[in-house]
Amino acid sequence: MLIQMRQIHMQIMAGTMLLAVAVTGLNTAVQAQDFGDTPYVQTPQNVVDAMLETAKVTSKDYVIDLGSGDGRMIITAAKKRGARGFGVDLDKRLVRLANDNARKAGVADRAKFYARDLFETDLSPASVITIYLLPEVNLMARGKLLALAPGTRIVSHDYGIGDWLPDTEYEMDAPGKPVGRSQKSKVLYWVVPDIVAGRWTWTVDIGGKPQRVELDVRQNFQKLEATAKLEGRTIPVEQAKLTGRRIEVTLQLPERGRVTFSGLRINQAIEGEMRAADKDSKNANKAAPWSAVRIELRDAAHVIAPPPVIREFGTP
């Protein structure tokens, strides 16, 4: 009898342990599912309008909204700007509501919504991405966003994307905003950058003689740092700017003064034009063809940086 009682006690203890493990696993799963989710909060209509204006959305654009809620971003893009696109959301009820709203607005053929995980969504058709997600979700999606075609525009409501600083950021009134006390919203805007890091070279005519320019470019996201040499002698770099695939560099050249070189990267070359940077120069409005060749390929700093540390919003 004593042995039987001990066996029963051991079985009860084992069952209790299994139940505890099951409950712990369930809690862990719930926590894992919650982390990276974004609660639904409506973006005020005037903020929607401002975001689309900031991205300069037109009828030529294809817009994808991540966390589309009631569909107002894509519906507005279709109705007011003639764009096409779709939105994704995990909440099937909101997806049904968004599709109903698109039908009522008469744009169901150009604005569609899907119950889908944003991390499993193909974003490659987009020329514009719109987001209203928590900071950690933005950071989790950063690699996916940076992998888009250079020149793709991204506009976010309220939150940034880690240390990838926006090209444009501003605050605006947001009457009726359901969160926060200030009734203010931030709009943040990026253009996905090309990779132009490395050494570039070209020739330029100075005093009737072709002279070799070498430009050394270091890159972190869209931010460039550059040094230049003319026939081996260092010359000032006044500006080095990258927007999508377009690079623009202003150099101070002997005899020619300030000259701006601008163009698009095509494989390992840049094709574009050069012109005097000084407005009062007699050649200010005259552009000449310009091309450069990359003689050394280099990774951008953000490409080789360690993966970002992602913490849940609100934790230190």
Image (tube, grey):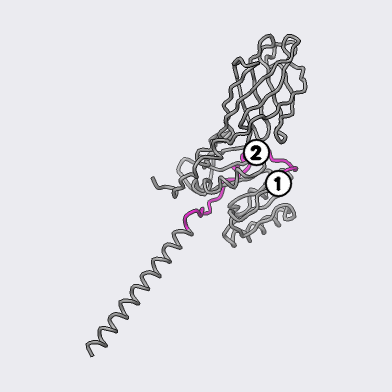
Q: Which residues are magenta?
A: 34-62
Whichever of callouts 2 and 1 sits on the residue coming sooner in the sequence is 2
- The residue singled out by tag 1 in the image is 62
The residue to which callout 2 is attached is: 55
Amino acid, disc 2 = Ala
Asked if residue 170 lies left or right of residue 60, the reply is: left
Residue 241 x/y as whole percent: 62, 27
Q: Residue furthest left?
A: 2
Give the distance between the C-alpha atoms of the residues marked 2 and 1, in whole angstroms.
12 Å
The mark found on residue 136 in the picture is none
Q: Quadrant of the N terminus?
A: bottom left
Q: Position of residue 282 (x, y in %)?
A: 74, 10
**Which image quadrant for residue 156?**
top right
In the structure shown, which secondary structural element does the residue marked by tag 2 occupy?
A: loop
Secondary structure at badge 1 equals strand
Check if residue 40 falls in the magenta segment: yes
**Image point (42%, 47%), residue name:** 314
The foreground one among 159 and 163 is 163
Where residue 261 sits: x, y (%)?
69, 22
Is residue 226 inside the magenta stretch?
no
